[in-house]
Image: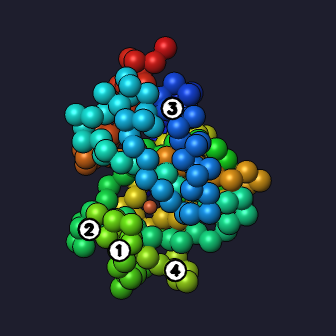
Amino acid sequence: MECYYKFDIDTTQILNLDYINRKAVENSGKGMTLVISQLALKPSFFNYLKPYGLRDYLMLFLRRSGNLNEETHTDYVTDEQPHHYSLNILCQGQGTMSWFYRPEGGGQMLRHPNDPTRIIYETFNGMELDPIDKWTDGKIALVRTGIPHGVRNDGTEDRVCLSIRIDDYGWEHAKEIYNNFFKTSLQ
Ligand SMILES: [Fe+2]
């Protein structure tokens, strides 16, 4: 199974990095904060994604250099339905995102205290899972979030990762949606 699909795009063409980096500094010490999509994305990218169900708030994941705790989990939209995918953009640092096979019996369902109705996880903390793949280089990738995954930051820089979520069009169609914009709207 393809767990991630990379795009070779200059991040500064699609993001307002001044705003994102300011939010990252303001929230350093937290693992995640929400940013306003209209402020985080350049207008052309925001307007292109809006009809595809772009969320008003996007998650900005913050992971200190040397934090090796993967916190392996699967993202859910409801208690029964896993979340499909996310466009992850590294605004600073790198780290490693890894994917794993879901163990028999599953993990433990949890709700995020920031937004318990919409941020639902199945966690696999402390469990030894069989690996599928790893993403270790490049700044932008469509990543699967509906199978167990985790991030460790083994790099020297703090990791700042914006997670862009739209509605579920299936994996192949989602690749097309992003490729269409990157090929036609960016030079
Ligand atoms: Fe996740």
Distance in Å between CA atoms under marks 3 and 2: 29 Å
Q: Which residue is mark 2?
A: 117
On the image, numbered disc 4 is attached to which residue?
Answer: 125
Label 3: few (<14), some or many (≥20) within 10 Å?
Answer: some
Q: Position of residue 153 (x, y in %)?
A: 67, 59
First in sequence, mark 2 or 1: give its number: 1
- Front tag of 1 and 4: 1
Where on the picture, by quarter, is residue 145?
Answer: bottom left
Residue 62: horizontal and vertical position, in percent? Answer: 58, 56
**Quarter of the image where one finds residue 131:** bottom right
Of tags 3 and 4, the one toward the viewer is: 3
Q: Earlier in the sequence, mark 2 or mark 4?
A: 2
Q: What residue lies at 49% left-to-right and 51% top-to-bottom?
A: 60
Q: Are marks 3 and 4 in contact (CB under 8 Å)?
A: no
Depicted 94 relative to depicted 132: above or below: above
Q: Name the residue rendered at 40%, 48% in the picture.
A: 58
Q: Is residue 40 above or below residue 158?
A: above
Q: Are marks 1 and 4 in contact (CB under 8 Å)?
A: no
Looking at the rendered structure, the kind of residue marked 1 is Arg
Where does the N terminus fall, quadrant-wise? Answer: bottom left
Residue that extends furthest to the right in the rendered view of this protein = 156
Q: Reading the chain from its start, which is encountered first: label 1 or label 3?
A: 3
Q: How many marks?
A: 4
* Tag of residue 16: 3
